[in-house]
Amino acid sequence: MPKRVVLAYSGGLDTSVIVRWLTDRGFEVITYTADVGQGEELSEIPQKAKASGAVEAIVEDLREEFAREYCLPTLRALALYEGKYPLSASLSRPLIAKKLVQHAEKYGADYVAHGSTGKGNDQVRFELSSWALNPELEVIAPVREWEFKSREEEVDYALRHSIPVKATKEKPYSIDKNLWGISIECGPLEDPWVEPPEDAFEWTVSPKKAPDEPEYLEIGFKEGTPISINGKTYELLGELIIDLNRLAGRHGIGRIDMVENRLVGIKSREVYEAPGATVLYEAYRDLLSLTLDRFTFHYFLSHIPSQYAKVVYEGLWFSPLRSAMDAFTSSLSKYVEGVVRLKLYKGSVQVVGRYSPRSLYVEDLATYSEKDAFDHKAGASFTKVFGLPLKILGRVSKG
């Protein structure tokens, strides 16, 4: 019986070459392609995969599952890896791995495969997720094993075998897209001193070419879920995110350029586009601040965003820790209800207004007008007690 493998297949350079490479080594290759909102036409994927040697090609629309079960929990955690990256590629990997496992079990395959490199993060995400769900499956990572030393060599191989790919020697970017963002690597971006060329970006215009007038958006939330843009209600969260990518992208919002610490210990220059996610993070954080008490909000900020991001980035999606943090953020999400007004202008997004029926803001306590109801005399006693440790320290220090 031939060896059977289910391959995570994007149709890009690496995975296109992998199909032929595995086939030449005696594998029956079943490709699996997930539509996670990358905005590309996938109807030609099966034909392309089979032309490269695949015996079966599966394409599934996972946009709403990805939006609700992966992007939304991460938004509720306000998770940004190293304070910048909204984890777009990191989030899609556990979902795709889950589907690889399901189809491997369905088709009787003993192997799953992915196109990650030996120094990339995705190898960990795919493999840990696969083993968490089915520890008996073997994982193949051809890019860690094959003879090619550069993407240019892969391009040559693809051309020799009539495998159509978008990457060329003139524009050798490695692109990964889903509705939460785009990851862009390789080519001139490998020099951290070089400004990213404009041809590297797909969803965002240069802020210099963005409209000269700001655009205002009102995003509505219900129980921690974004449900509307400018009064238009969305039944599908994925569609809301995709529309927000378009709206924010035309103002140049969501470009991220960073040198991040990869799992394997090296530093890597990464460029991302995440217009919709960038706007939603600003809106969610602001509404959370408006509706949570100080003690809970400060605990959340101190413990959740960075730790949640680390768990997702390091491939631990199917871990009790992530589930436990989700339980916490889900319990807080019920307070996140209302509308946030944002100003989009030449690469920047700014919250300029917010309203919530759960708001803890009391104007009579905050105002400095004649409506002020705050007990100012109580402030003297409060300050005296609150500052007592420093007062004592000052006495001792003076000796």
Image (cartoon, helix red, strand yellow):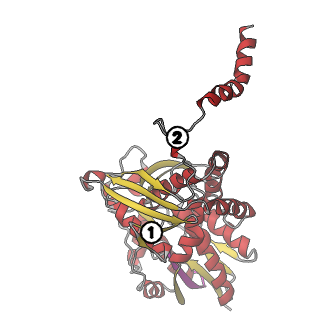
Discs 1, 2 touching: Cβ within 8 Å: no
Q: Quadrant of the N terminus?
A: bottom right
SS at circle 1: strand
Indicate which disc residue 111 carries.
Answer: none
Q: Amino acid at mark 2?
A: Ala
Which residue in the structure is indicated by mark 2? 366
Q: CA distance from mark 1 to mark 2?
A: 30 Å
SS at circle 2: helix
Mark 2 surroundings within 10 Å by alpha-carbon count, few (fewer than 14), some (14 through 19), many (20 or more): few
Residue 73: x and y in percent read 60, 64
Residue 131: x and y in percent read 72, 71
Q: Residue at x 42, y 52 (%)?
A: 353
Q: Earlier in the sequence, mark 1 or mark 2?
A: 1
Task: Please name the predominant secondary structure of the magenta segment in the image.
Answer: strand
> Between residues 220 and 165, which one lies in front from this camera angle?
220
Relative to 41, is 387 above or below? above
Region rendered in magenta: 25-36
Q: Amino acid at mark 1?
A: Ser
> Between residues 72 and 273, which one lies in front from this camera angle?
72
Residue 71: quarter of image: bottom right
Residue 134: quarter of image: bottom right
Which residue in the structure is indicated by mark 1? 228
Residue 295: quarter of image: top right
Residue 148: x and y in percent read 50, 66
Left or right for 120, reference 130: left
Residue 246: x and y in percent read 36, 66
Furthest residue toward front: 370
